[in-house]
Amino acid sequence: MRIDDVNLTQILVDQATQRPHEPAIVESAGRGVRSLTFAEVADRSARAASLFREAGLYKGDRVLVFQPMSIELYVALLAIFRLGLVATVLDPSAGRGHIEQCCGIARPRAFIGPARAHLLRLLCRGLRRIERHFVTAGRAPGATRWSILERLDPAHSITACDPSHDALLTFTSGSTGVPKAAVRSHGFLLAQHAALAESIELEPGEVDLATLPIFVLANLASGVTTVIPQGDLRRPGFIEPGPVLEQLRRHRVTRTVGSPALYARLLQGARAASDAGSESGKTGLGGLRKLYTGGAPVFPPLLQELRSALPKGRVIVVYGSTEAEPIAHLDWSEAEPDDLDAMNAGKGLLVGRPVHRIELRILPNRWGMPLQAMTAGEFADLALDPGEAGEIMVSGPHVLSGYLNGIGDEETKFRVEGEVWHRTGDAGYLDARGRLWLLGRAGAVIQDERGAIHPFAAECAASQLPWIARSALAKHNGNRVLAVQLGPRAPADAEWRVQETLSWAKLDRIVRVPRIPVDRRHNAKTDYPALKKELERHAN
């Protein structure tokens, strides 16, 4: 059977046949643990498919999923894929206005989530307009209870879908206007699975602590056991580390994928647990064989600390985006002293070589201006040579080719001989060895009479000072300003030392702020609009 002829549900069914009794997903449940084998996940998702079918849902219908990362989330997703429905996912914490906009764009026919998610129906007209409701935990008025799955016969058949058929719909935050809807087809999900399985080396029998939803789908399709961390995954930088460290120990986790903010917390927790003499403290992160981190800039000090915490393991940086995951990766053990010197000197952040399944080019930075279709010759002439900084452009089977209704395509897509290329919005360059260096957001570069300076150049260099918890470069009132969040052991002359270390950056001011604001999802990317407000308060 060719991969183009199946969807992820079929691949999971194959895994259930090959390893029926091996655990597929493990999660905390109250004071205990709940676990489903690969065969049980396949059976339960087939029963959920029966429930959706009895409710009158048909191929192409959209199902709004408000289920947190859990076993039931993947049971629901696999049932949706099995029937050729379209899983529609958005962040309910983004607020009522965002939910109303997204419901107006997607027009889902069904809504699924726990009882607390159904409370939103009282506030949002868009949710009340949805015809069918399913409640996965507790009770909700007018909603079918998920518990009836036990009484249903499984729907073993899998609806045939063309690779171009929609499978998953997600939304951007809409912070700059109307939310964009990213549409992933069945073919896209399969291509992404293949790229992930290769780049993060998924091997059957491994046990993965996964914090990002898309990686669990890749695990299920690869015969890898997933352990879902105990805690609020919406705020990885604030998660309580003790329970997660105990999960690593108890379930003998061998690999993990997550935000750098999460691993910073786990390192803090491991140190505290070790000082207290606990079992999880003695083990710490040392049982891991592979640790993949990304979704936000990962600077050398954290990577070096993680490397020390994993004496028998590997630490790998993964660079990607919502529209293209993965793009590049770097095994930190392959970074050389000269690379570290370059990062400390403001040359940017090394993220390694592009993955095999992607095409990557650097073009002159024209962020904010649409790019017109061009010939292969025009594209080749425009592409920059190694060492020249510009916008990072990617293309490939696991790169999103467009948004729903074309909203957002003009700013982020262009065509070369009919092939779609995606503008990541990031700036960077390729070195002579074909490795990618990140410089920050393409729209955040500061250009003045002194030349150009990029955010990651300054922030990566500043990270070498051990008492800087976080920094962010911004232009404020015409000045080059580096906002710094200092740690408890910062010296009295911290500003002078930063100026001295980053003399090449020709900074106008160093501004202390209580906390650098970060994004909601990874708790690690600088939130520039919020930073501007912080500078207004502290830079005057």
Image (cartoon, rainbow, N blue to C red):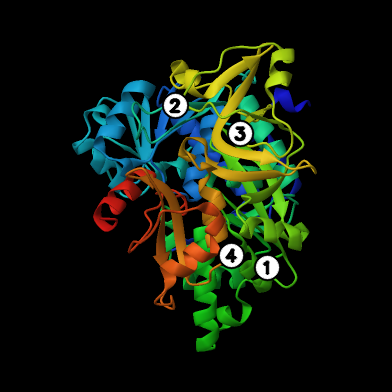
Distance, label 1 to label 2, CA atoms, is: 38 Å
Q: Quadrant of the C terminus?
A: bottom left
Image spot of residue 118 (x, y percent): 28, 41
Q: Quadrant of the N terminus?
A: top right
Residue at which label 2 appears = 181
Whether tag 1 and tag 2 are in contact, CB under 8 A, the answer is: no
Q: Secondary structure at mark 2?
A: strand
Residue at which label 1 appears = 307
Task: Tell which of 242 and 522 is nearer to you.
Answer: 522
What residue is rendered at 65% in x and 25% in y? 187
User: Can the viewer see residue 229?
Assistant: no
From this view, report whether residue 376 is shown above or below residue 528. above
Distance, label 1 to label 4, CA atoms, is: 9 Å
Going from the N terminus, do you reach mark 1 or mark 4 first? 4
Distance, label 1 to label 3, CA atoms, is: 31 Å
Q: Secondary structure at mark 3?
A: strand
Whether tag 4 and tag 2 are in contact, CB under 8 A, the answer is: no
Going from the N terminus, do you reach mark 3 or mark 2 first? 2
The nearer-to-camera label among 1 and 3 is 3
What residue is rendered at 51% in x and 31% in y? 80
